Amino acid sequence: MANAAVYLDTASSEPLHPAARETLLAALDHGYADPRRLHGPGRTARLLLDNAREAIAGALGVRRDEVTFASSGSRAVQRGLLGLAGARAERGRPIAHSAVEHQAVTDAAAWWGAPRELGVDAYGRLDLDAVRSLAPDTAALALQSANHEVGTLQPVAEAAEIAGGVPLLVDACASMGRVPLPHGWDALAGSAHKWGGPSGIGVLLIRHRARWIDPFPAGDPFARTDEPVDIAAALAAAAALQAVVAERDQIGSRQRALIDRIRARVADIADVDVVGDPVERLPHLVTFSFLYVDGEALVTELDRLGFAVASGSACAVDTREPSRVLAAMGALTHGNVRLSLGRETTPAEVERFLDVLPGVVHTIRERAGL
Amino acid sequence: MLCPAPIIALGRSLGSVAIGDLLAVAADDPAARHDVPAWARMRGQEYLGERAAEDGVPVYVVRRLS
């Protein structure tokens, strides 16, 4: 291949940030012991984990005792949501969530029982009137800070205010590090490999004043304990988060301009649905769908040409179900591509992508006889 | 039919009906439920809704407007 692959799928997983790599290598030899033990190596492990906690708290602007670690972002979402629901209600009283939440939320809400789905508009933004009509017996409300497939930012603070006493879990996996945390949450989840930390590290924030109970068997269900995590990886995740927060104004504005450019150029291709809020959105992500185009063929052909992209189309995922997010928004679900830029994505790479895309779409449509 | 075959069939058949006439596609592909209305919106046609064929397969009906 003439060019190394251009990776445009950071919303699925961001490559390790240089700050994380450096910290990971330095910490690998020291974080092996059980941080609950009283011996020297245990104390060292404990110290490293607390350093990671402190760094994450500082980067996010929360209290250190509000930061816990989980074994993944999805796990943090589920522990956070089910812990809020369990502290407030018996099982069977519904968890409400927007129609465009990640599957980690919808799975947890269904497992808890009788979930209630709240509608969204054509940009995928939560309908606040649906929050106004929440039943008072709602066990908990789950809302993402920003949508992971289309980038639209959600009105978290407004929803929290309207929801009143119903506790709010915010799934911030798509946005953590890239934009400031929203206000109004009782628990909030993030995922390190989406900001350039290692995979296998989730962050669950629980407000010190929130009522929360461990949803899984635990010695002390009221203790806000960490799930066992790789301590060197937790420290690397913290270092990456600090670095990403420090550089986000600069990198975010560069990415925002590139996404604006992509949105404008892609909209010139015939029969395309460019999806999501063009302004109130994550800086690095855009989704669009082409009529009459098979999403799997599109992803495969772009991969052959050296571009790694994601797709929410039914034929491009193993469930063979179309994206619930696109469906809830009324967007076209087939022929879908999600692009998400990295911190090093260059304008030249974006231009090369934009130059090949119309031809790829044209060829697939021609094959379909259109 | 798998995605996006029902939509391709709609796109190919649109020209064969007169403006104002109805066109329908039967599809058990779950994406069609979302993609037929999206197709109608993007192509400026009118989506009229869904009914079931005798064998239970959903049939999606549109009116040609242009």
Image: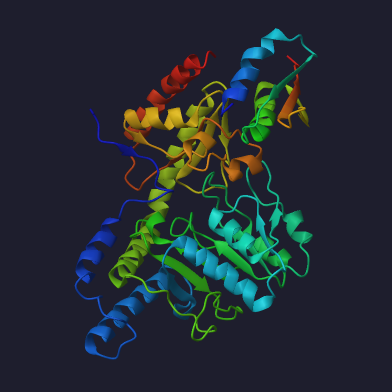
Please tell me whether residue A286 is drawn above or below residue A272 in the rendered image. below
Q: Measuring from the top left, give residue A230's x and y in whole percent.
A: 32, 70
The quarter of the image holding the N terminus of chain A is top left
Question: How many numbered discs, if any?
Answer: 0
Residue A133 left/right relative to A125: right
Q: How is the image coloured?
A: rainbow
* Foreground of the two, A155 or B23: B23
The location of residue A304, given as percent across then percent down, is: 33, 29
Compared to A192, does A91 lie above or below? below
Which residue is located at x 53 percent, y 39 percent?
Answer: A320
Residue A128 vs B18, above or below: the answer is below
The spot of residue A288 in percent (x, y) is 53, 34
Foreground: A203 or A39? A39
Q: Would residue A183 be visible to someone looking at this image?
A: no
Residue found 57% across the figure and 63% down from its top: A170
For the point 62% across and 23% down, which residue is it? B7
Task: Give coordinates of residue A305: x percent, y percent.
Answer: 33, 28
Q: Residue furthest bottom?
A: A38
Relative side of B27 to A10, left or right: right
Q: Is residue B15 visible?
A: yes
